[in-house]
Image (cartoon, rainbow, N blue to C red):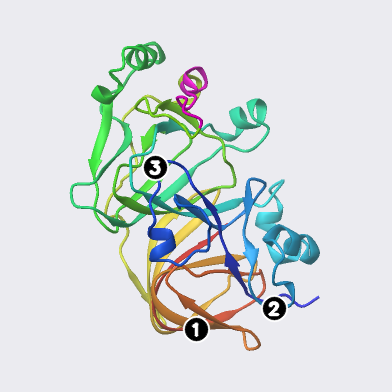
Amino acid sequence: MTMYPLLLTPHVTDYLWGGTRLKTEYGYPTDKDIAAEAWVLSCHKDGASVVQNGEFAGKTLPEVLALWGDDAIGARAAAFPYFPLLIKLIDAKDRLSVQVHPDNEYALRVEGEFGKTEMWYVVDCDEGAELIYGFNTTLTKEELRAQIEADTLPDVCNFVPVKKGDVFFIEAGTLHAIGKGILIAEVQQNSNTTYRVSDYGRLGADGKPRPLHVDKAVDVTVPTPPTRPYGQTGEFIPVAGAAVRPLADCEFFTANLVNVDGTASFGMGDTFVSLLCLDGEATLTDGNVTLTLTKGASAFIPAGVAVKVTGKAQLLQSYV
């Protein structure tokens, strides 16, 4: 069975804080009024990507990978119990809840799925936008709970002004919240487990406050200031036909920003590669299949498949 590059249609969610840019600017199809997140590469049970091209058009990505087997994702990805990555575009018209994600040990024991370490790349943002990234002081678990219960948590949060091109590595256990007016590309472990600490008293679609998960959040939160560099991290490195800016490299994924200007080669050989077009236009070909990559296009390149991308485009490259 011949493997080939897949062009994917995302699963779109309509969380109440979302906007419409994913529909109007990126052209993602949805009948929802709000398009909060586009899961541009997803094998998750809560919403899988769908193949657009070739003999498997109309099938979900998990269905195609089941047919192709582990050779399609490579040995490193196959070592995980299930497909390891979930990649999203997030349009935060309003601020997200203050939240935290568990690590693998806690999530597997309590939730039955892996935890979530993630990376944010700020694609765009309003002037004056900010987000929460960890704390501005070190707390004990007891002090953290007291701040939550007294509704004074913002006093100890690390608020960070953001600008286009900023990068944040959100390790499991890091308290965080995307602020109003930010468009983010997120690379994360394939998990949908989130513990809300505060939701500003907002009501859900049912007219009731959305549930909080304070006990679990206190269990898993690391109540310290961030230790990793963030913001305008990573320098562009020239390569043939492109320049590559490293964004994140951890045990769960690697992510790079790639500015293609000419013809660049992709395909890791021993692992799959995801390419998300953030801007510009290019063509992708493996010699047999040709795909057009425009703003928002998401391509899955199977392990062992080499491709060339020609044009002028900014791509988010992700793999394990």
Disc 2 or 1, which lies upstream in sequence?
2
Magenta span dominant secondary structure: loop
Q: Quadrant of residue 278?
A: bottom left
Amino acid bearing label 1:
Thr
Residue count near mark 1 (Cα–Cα under 10 Å), binned few <14, some 14–19, many ≥20: some
Which residue has dot 3 on it?
17
Q: Which residues are magenta?
A: 206-217
> Is 197 drawn above or below residue 41 in the view shown?
above
Q: Nearer the viewer, mark 3 or mark 2?
A: 3
Q: Nearer the viewer, mark 1 or mark 3?
A: 3
Tell me if I can see residue 271 in this picture.
no
Q: Report the residue at 62% width, 59% height from top.
A: 49
> Is 48 drawn above or below residue 172 in the view shown?
below
Residue 41: image x %, image y %? 57, 59
Which residue has dot 1 on it?
283
Disc 1 or 3, which lies upstream in sequence?
3
